Image: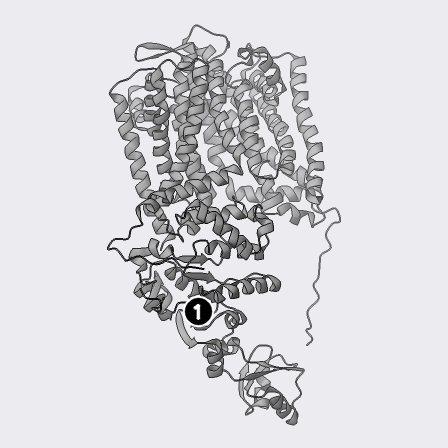
Amino acid sequence: MSAPTVTARRSRPRLPFPIAFAMPLALVERNARAGKHYWLTIVSGFFEPVFYLFAMGVGIGALVGTVEVDGRALPYAVFVAPALMATSAMNGAVYDSTQNVFWKLRFAKLYDTVLSTPMRPVDVAVGEISWALLRGLLYSTAFLAVAWAAGFVTSPWALLAIPACTLIGLAFASVGMAVTTWMTSWTHLEYVQLALLPMFLFSATFFPLSTYPEGLQWVVRATPLYHGVDLVRGLMTGDLHAGLLVHVAYLLVLGAVGVAVTARRIERLLLS
Amino acid sequence: MTTTATPVRTAVGHAAGGGWRAVLGYWMAVYRRIWKGTLISSFLAPLAYLAGMGLGLGALVDSGERTALGVPYVAFVATGLLAAQAMQTGVAETTFPVMGAIRWRRTYQAMLATPLREEDLVRGHVAYVTIRLAIVCGVFAVVATALGAMSGWGVLAAVPAAMLCGLAFAMPVYCYSCLVRSEQGYNVLSRFVIMPLFLFSGTFFPIAQLPGWLQAVAWVSPLTHAGALTRALGLGQGSPLWLDGGAFLLHTCYLLLWAVGGYAVAVRALRHRMTA
Amino acid sequence: MNDDAPLIQAVGRRKTYGAFTAVDGIDVEVAPGESFGFLGPNGAGKTSTMRIIACTSPATGGTVRVLGMDPATDASRIKAQLGVVPQEDTLDNDLTVTENLLVYGRYFGLPRATVRERAAELLEFAQLVDKRDELVENLSGGMKRRLTIARGLINTPRILLLDEPTTGLDPQARHILWDRLFRLKREGVTLVLTTHYMDEAEQLCDRLVVMDSGRIVAEGSPRALIREHASREVLELRFDVADHAERADDVAGIGRVEVLADRLLLYVEDGDAALEQVTARGVHPMSSLVRRASLEDVFLRLTGRSLIE
């Protein structure tokens, strides 16, 4: 067996360019290969938001009629479809980054193995989050196609809802993974529901912000899902305004903070 | 080398074993240890749904001219959620806990090494699920009644109707747990069966809104029948959703069919799994 | 770095976790092609030592160089040339046997074609060709271990680190594994392993250190250690008594005596001759056994305790 030769030491610990860049991708590849063994689960993830779309759009829509948003009357299905798309981006990202990551971190010890190779903690964080985003991209695209076919989409700007959902995924996946590094038992995962469910129900998803009294409206505005929902809704209904950029900035900051915290935590947990 | 050990004395157990009560004892011991973890999914989640759907969405629904429901939306949703939540509890308690007892912790193997029989295991589990359902449905009914979303003495009958709904799902899912080989099976169950039933069995809107063929499918779902029962009982005789005697009987029998039929198959399925 | 320079060099290496000292000032040097062992009971600090070498746990004192580099700053570059076989199998249960090798190779940034070729060779080496498409959860303990070793070789490492490679395996699986490790050793792979089995250390190590409570208590080749700290042969005597210490005086003067819970050990040059001496004194043990001295005896001598407790 031939041993690779050691190249001269550099002052800073760095991998050669292509390898350093490919590192997080190796973890994405791992997840894709593992995904082949549970493809049915991956496929099933697409159906949940679609079931919601028809239950809400068709069933509830018949009861509600139209919704008044910023002076425009929207059919209920048109109102609720963007919210469901944003919510499903959140749910998918959170599921991948909490439950799955918790399993790999505490039980499968996957990251112990990964870190015994040249992969670094930041590669693990970026790799896992990238995988969550890729999976989310599939779902968003499929959901938009279904909503479009059903006539619930009213603007071509809706195409931008796909990257917008990736951004929502980034924010939630990175924060979710960071939070997961503090979890030590399965019951802690229940607390994730405690944060998700209220956001799912109350972030102007199923009824507009104006339903709330003034004070509560500001509470809703503070939640990340509200920003996601409003961004996607603006794009899918063609209601473009400067406020959408605020949403983008909010989600970007959340994502960046999450990645940084995750990398630091993994380093502390597994390399000490 | 010789060792002189004191003879091990055994209290000769009853040949029939501790029966289902002993099995129930096991599950209650586990529950006492983890009950805090179930608070969120058992109590807070349904109440959040009631607040979000019933009150928030209800404001939208009730403000329109369409009064297809005949009752305030929050009352419609609360009575539907009572049954839907029983379904969720029944399913939750017969999926991972059962798979765990069969495959991960191998509790069932340990139990069957004693005089306990498969039917004791199933009966003990049914007893445990029934207790869980009573707690979950009871608390929900009290809160919904306090909010004015349910009223009348019929609420006292709506709780056992919801519990029967829980068992109508728990027993078939128990069978499924005996057959399923990996956790992936539960993802399929939850996304392709439970989730659609939750959404399309009349919990959030009357199934009359659905296309005709889907209505026919919805009537296969035990949840649709349970919802009709809990609505009639939870809203009282004066509501437009009250049922006549024949309909009560029919819905109840349909739920019993799933629960009792499911039990019979569950015992066989467990025996098959544990001896295979 | 020239070819004869030590691959691993540690001076005064320490590892503390809070108030607990796992490794207390260890000096070792491992040369290329050598097969080096850390022998000691559970809790002696072997795994902590291995983790420091593997760059997954920084030393809290002393200096460590692995492949001429500093783990604190060059961890990724060092790891690129190490193969790690952890104490517990950490195979990826979501993947098949082959996929485990392919995916692990990709963690090193190796090209797909290279990894595929290498994986095929390693399946052969690990005698797992028939199992290539099985999910790893369907493998036996011995097969999992061989796969873990194959996985550790995917990057053609210069050093293979093995933490308790045969713990928990049945005797047959152990021998298959030893056979594989011998082959690697012959091919010039530097092996660094920990073990609490003295037979394993004798079989596999050119040189070893005996560790106890985070310290090195002896160092040398297995043969040299036995020569230095034990005798050529050992006579084991069992008596029908509750406490073997009562009979120690009966055999005093024949050789060094160690009293164990269930037998007496006599360290002598000629075991049969010693047994004759014992019987000549009119002492008749329930059973007796003459054997060659082993590392177990060395350890007993150095620490006053058995290796496996």
- The extreme right residue here reads B15
> Which residue: 56% across, 91% down?
C254
Percent from the top left, x then y, of residue C100?
50, 48
> Which residue: 48% across, 14% down?
A58
Percent from the top left, x then y, of residue B69?
50, 10
Picture quadrant where residue C284 is located: bottom right
Local crowd at mark 1 within 10 Å, few (<14), some, or many (≥20)? many
| Foreground pick, B141 / A198 | A198
Left or right: where C116 falls relative to B227 = left
Q: Is residue B62 above or below residue C122?
A: above
Percent from the top left, x then y, of residue B112?
69, 47
Mark count: 1
- Image quarter where the C terminus of chain B lies is top right
Left or right: where B243 falls relative to A271 = right
Percent from the top left, x then y, of residue A178?
36, 41
Element assignment for label 1: strand
Q: Amino acid at mark 1?
A: Phe
Residue carrying label 1 = C36
- Image quarter where the N terminus of chain B lies is bottom right
